[in-house]
Amino acid sequence: LHIPFCLRKCPYCDFFSVTRTSPLFQEFPRLLMAHLRLQAERDQAGPFSTVFFGGGTPSLLSPSSVEAILAEVDRLFGLEAEAEVTLEANPGTLSLDILSGFRAAGINRLSLGLQSLRDDKLQTLGRLHTAAEGRQAVGWARQAGFDNLSCDLMFGLPAQSLSQLMADVEAVLSLQPEHLSCYGLTVEEGTPFEELQRQALLHPAAEDLATEMYVALHERLSGAGYDHYEISNYARPGHACRHNQVYWRRQGYLGLGPGAHSFSDQGWGERWEVPPDIGRYARALKEGRDPRTHLETFDRRGAMAETLYLGLREAAGVDEACFRARFGQGVAEAYPTAVRKASPHLLYENGRWYFALSGWLLYDHLIQNFL
C-alpha cells in the first residue's frame, strides 16, 4: 500500500511522493479503500500473509485510517492470523499516542527511517528529525508494544569517515532493533542530489571507502548476532522481513496506491503499475476505472533471468532443483557463460547458488551477465 505523502521531499529520494498539503491527502484513505474494493471484484487473491504500508511517509496517516484500511483488507481478501503488517514511519511524525494507535490498529512491525544518529548527517540528508528524536521514537515504539522494529541506516554519505559510520552503528545497536536495513547512498536521476553532484557540490564516499564500509557493516552486525540475509538487510533470527522476501522470491503480490507495482506469478509472470500521478489515481477511482496499467508479460527466458536477479540478492540464493523443475534447465546449463564470469564470487553448495560477500559488492556488474 503506497502512501505517497511527505512533510517534505528528501533530496536523495526518487520514490513518488507529494507534500501533505495536497488537497487529496484527507481523501486518500477513502480512495485507497475504493481501490481495494475495485480490486477485490477483479482478483480473488488472499488471504494475505503480509501487508506493507510504504511511502512516502505512511506514518502521516492517522491510526484510525490505518485501522479502517486494514479492516477493509481483511473483509475483502482476508488476513492470515499471523500476518506480518509493517508500517514505515519517520521519527519526526511520531508520538507515543500515535504509535500506540498504530499498534492497536494492527501494525505489528515498524520500519523506522532513522538513516543516522548524527545530527550533521541528518541535515546533509535533508531529514526533518534530529538524532534525539530518532532515539525517542524507538523508546516510544517499545512503550507502545512493538517487539519487531526495523531501523534504516545509510552509509557512504558526503564527508563520512569509516569511524563516523561505525560510531553510528554502535549507537543504533544500543537501541537493539530486531532488523536493520543498511543502504549505501546512491545519487538517483532527477533528484536534487543529482543536481548538486553535477555542480560538484555533493561528494558521496569514494568507491573504495564505500566498499570498506560495507564490509565493516557486515562484520560488525554479523558479530552482533544479525543474519546478513539479503544484500542490504540484517535480521535477528526469526525477524527477516517476510514481505520483502515475497519480492525476492518472485511470488505474487498486489500493489495499491499511486506508484505501487503488482506481480502475478501465474504462467511466466506479469507485472502492473499504478502510475505515479495522484490526480489520475483519484479520477480513475471516482469513475470506477482500474488505475493500474500493464507493464510487462514475461516469457520463459525473462522469468529465468528475473528469478536469478532477485534470488541472488538473498543469502539463501537460488535452489537448483526448484529452478530446474520450473524452467527445465539448471542454472549452469542455462547460463554457462554468466556462471563462468561470476566465478569465484558465485558459489554452489548444498544444491543452492548464492553470492559470496565479494559477489554482493560486485552485484550490479556480475548480474548483468544473466540479463
Image: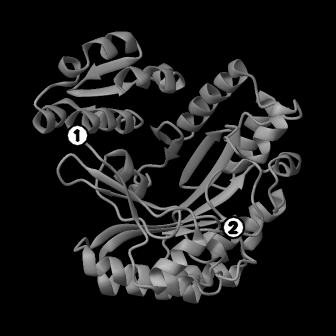
Residue 166 at least partly seen: yes
Query: How busy is the neighbourhood of tag 2: few (under 14 within 10 Å), some, or many (20 plus)?
Result: some
Name the residue that disc number 2 marks: 18
Residue 69 at least partly seen: no
Query: How busy is the neighbourhood of tag 1: few (under 14 within 10 Å), some, or many (20 plus)?
Result: few
> How many numbered dots are placed on residues in this image?
2
Please state which of residues 107 and 288 is positioned toward the viewer in this rendering.
288
**Residue depicted at 58% across the width and 66% down the height:** 277
Q: Is residue 112 left or right of residue 251?
A: right
Please tell me in which quadrant of the rendered image residue 201 appears: top right
Instruction: Point out which mark residue 299 bears.
Output: 1
Q: Secondary structure at mark 1?
A: loop
Position in image of residue 161 (x %, y %) = 81, 29
Q: Is residue 330 left or right of residue 220?
A: left
Q: Is residue 253 left or right of residue 300?
A: right
Position in image of residue 158 (x %, y %) = 82, 34
Q: Secondary structure at mark 2?
A: strand
Kindly identify the amino acid type of the residue bearing the numbered disc 1. Answer: Asp
Position in image of residue 81 (x %, y %) = 30, 76
Please state which of residues 322 and 43 is positioned toward the viewer in this rendering.
43
Please state which of residues 124 and 287 is positioned toward the viewer in this rendering.
287
